Amino acid sequence: MKPPRNSPQPGAALRRPAPSLSGNPVVVDAPAGHGPCPLVIQSRAEGLLLSAWSAGRRTELEALATERGAVLLRGFSVQGAEDFETCVENIAGGALEYRFRASPRTEVGRNVYTATDYPAEQSIFPHNEHSYSPLCPRYLIFYGETPAEQGGETPLGDAREITRRIDPSVKERFLRRGVLYVRNYGAGFGLPWPTVFQTDDRAEVERYCAGLGIEWEWRSGDRLRTRQTGPAMIRHPATAEQVWFNHATFFHVTTLPAPLRDALTAEFSAGDLPTQTYYGDGAPIEADVLEHLRAVYQGALTQFGWRRNDVLLVDNILAVHGRTSFRGFRRILVAMAQSFKPRDFAVIPEPSS
């Protein structure tokens, strides 16, 4: 598929010179290549407030995130969740409300949340945040308020590399058919629908779903089922690169740890699972395809270990993230910024000749 007229050519952002940060009290470390390791901008001035330094640097930082996939701001001072809100405003234009939720999170500030409240012993498979949703955040901004005593790394993966590694026949199959997401709420597993939609008003849920093309079905016992399709790949809004971007692997029951997977499949039929994915036409995704995709994601990861006050800017299209298990108290905060609709950037396969 050719990029739209007047849009940047694929990889254009990679060829732009990085914004100059010379003369500022920071040092920039750019690892070789364009792997999943973030570009590191480290303060060399003790006590330098990130909320002060980042003012007026949004364009620079967004360009660097597009080039590298992620930018780590390290060694700055961040004085809690409220100060982090100011950093988010400076870095990416303000935080979005977390709606159509999938992960348990606690709101600790104005649209600032704990990264996840899943138990410490659980690891989280790498994914693009909210890529199951018709409305997604372009950027994630993480804040290492309290790193874990042991473990708790955030694996990062280069979505460009993931896209390159996926078997062409698998890509073609998903491009033609898309991804169907089925979610069930209110059966004792997963988040209840009032938490997912941040309202207990059924009419408000229906308005939200109708506005985004999500099908809904109210079921007995105050249960709800939603269904919607999404693209498998999208064009990056800035570079027009075609990137794998979906939750087909993450939301499939077979990707869960074996004890949880076995408990769910014993309790529920396929159609009643809390989350499940299919090809867009409703056909099951083959087991070997899912194994291939899981191996691709895992093979593209590097571990990112947190230090206190780290702030990590992630281009949510160009980098996937996860979490390792950990010991001790850990509190990593997250904000999401700049919503977009994946359907607006969907990669459409060329018609067969």
Image (cartoon, helix red, strand yellow):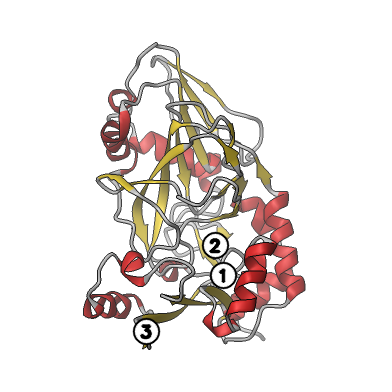
The residue beneath circle 2 is 245
**SS class, disc 1:** loop
Q: Quadrant of the N terminus?
A: bottom right
Q: Earlier in the sequence, mark 3 or mark 1?
A: 3
Q: CA distance from mark 3 to mark 1?
A: 34 Å
Q: Quadrant of the C terminus?
A: bottom right
Q: Which amino acid type is marked by label 3?
A: Gly
Would residue 337 appear left or right of 276 to someone viewing this image?
Answer: left
- Residue 36 or residue 114, whichever sits in front: 114
Q: Residue at x 52, y 56 (%)?
A: 128
Q: Residue at x 57, y 75 (%)?
A: 277
**SS class, disc 2:** loop
Check whether the beta carbons of the residues at disc 1 and disc 2 lie within 8 A of each other: yes
Which percent across, then down, holds residue 11? 56, 49
**SS class, disc 3:** loop
The residue beneath circle 3 is 221
- Residue 325 or residue 342, whichever sits in front: 325
Q: Which amino acid type is marked by label 1?
A: Ala
- Indicate whether 322 appears above or below 308: below
Would residue 143 appear left or right of 257 to someone viewing this image?
Answer: left
The residue beneath circle 1 is 232
